[in-house]
Image (spheres, rainbow, N blue to C red):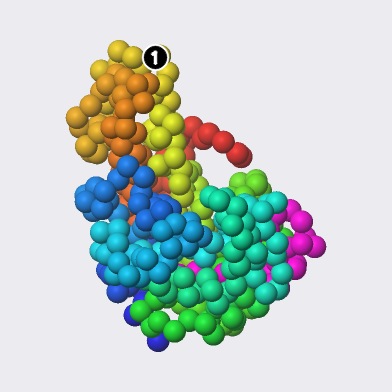
Amino acid sequence: MTDFSFELLSEDSRTAARAGVMHTPHGDIPTPVFAPVGTLATVKTMTPSDLHELGVNLVLANTYHLYLRPGADLVLRMGGLHRFMGWEGPILTDSGGFQVFSLEGLRRITDEGVTFRSHLDGSTHLFTPERVVAIQQKLGADIIMAFDECADPSDHAYNAQAVARTHQWAERCLAAKTRDDQAMFGIVQGGVFHDLRAQSAEYLTSLDFPGYAIGGLSVGETKAQMHAALEWLHPLLPGDKPRYLMGVGSPEDLFECVARGVDQFDCVLPTRIARNGAVLTHLGRLNLRNAQFAEDPAPIEEGCACYTCRTFSRAYLRHLIVANEITGLRLATQHNLHFVLDIMRRIRRAILDGSFADYKASFLAQYQVVGRQ
């Protein structure tokens, strides 16, 4: 038993969308939920009080990065991740599997684990399932991830190997886990291949994790391939357990993936594009660096209730961003997080009142998508 449970409250009659609540030691998480990414135990430019005011219910921190700096032992000595970063709400830590995947040329993978070189100083380290669990237990997040291998989504032969290894590692992670106040999610892999995704879902659900993450998507495949994988998995994953799509969070993806049964998301997109001067609106992204906004007295978006839109003009925000003022990045981040979190709240309400399909169609009809299709 763990101090974690999931309560499914409603299922949409026209799509696979679901609304529920995850109960954790640090509070309840209404779902569907978007988790801002706080890689190094901070959501960049935001304070915990900012996140609280924005209505954040879950923050993600990164095992790989925190292991390298400042170190899990130091975080433990400081009272654990919640106290260390001053955030009393729920926290999720990922396993570092994706970061290892991204270190091509700096890592070697075997059945034992992954040997890699730090991107900070080139020092050599070994991540095994047991060590990854030990690190996450020291960090003390409410939800932790089993160690997995994230592979190139289009290589069937290698994905078959990676799935088998992920399954072995999942068993070892469960055996290594000793804390009852943390919920460990298994991670379904298999790239863009139906047979491998089905195999992974069947095996991992037999291990009875309290929740299931869907990994290996948004790493180069098309949107159609991602949607297909979610549709395959919907009937294969337990209906009474949360489903977490890792690393996905553009506005259009939130609608499309909620419609395919996803309960939980995280993504750097809202905060990362803000630091590049881009902001989200219901019509699509705006690049505030563009000269057309130099004398624009309007807010980022009329009717937006965030502090940035209530207080400042596009002209002022453009001035701050072009001048490389930190306040500009902070205000853009605040707006983008408000935008995504507000969408998620509206999505949840629409699922509960039966209007989700209509809301989805209305939003996507006017939203201009940027990026991969």
Of 56 and 233, the residue lying toward us: 56
The foreground one among 136 and 231 is 136
- The residue segment tinted magenta is 143-165
Q: Residue furthest left?
A: 311
Residue at position x 41%, y 58% from top?
Answer: 70
- Position of residue 342 measured from the top left corner of the image (x, y, whole percent): 31, 47
Q: Position of residue 82 (x, y in %)?
A: 30, 64
The quadrant in which residue 80 appears is: bottom left
Residue 321's place in the image compared with 239, above or below, is above
Q: Residues within 10 Å of mark 1 (few under 14, many from 20)?
A: few
Amino acid type of the residue tagged 1 in the rendering: Gln
Disc 1: which residue: 292
The foreground one among 138 and 153 is 138
Q: How many badges with numbers are in the image?
A: 1
Residue at (32% x, 32% y) in the render: 326
Per the image, label 1 sits on a secondary structure element best described as helix
Residue at image point 52% right, 65% down = 95
Q: Position of residue 79 (x, y in %)?
A: 29, 70
In this rendering, the answer to whether 83 lies above or below 204 is: above
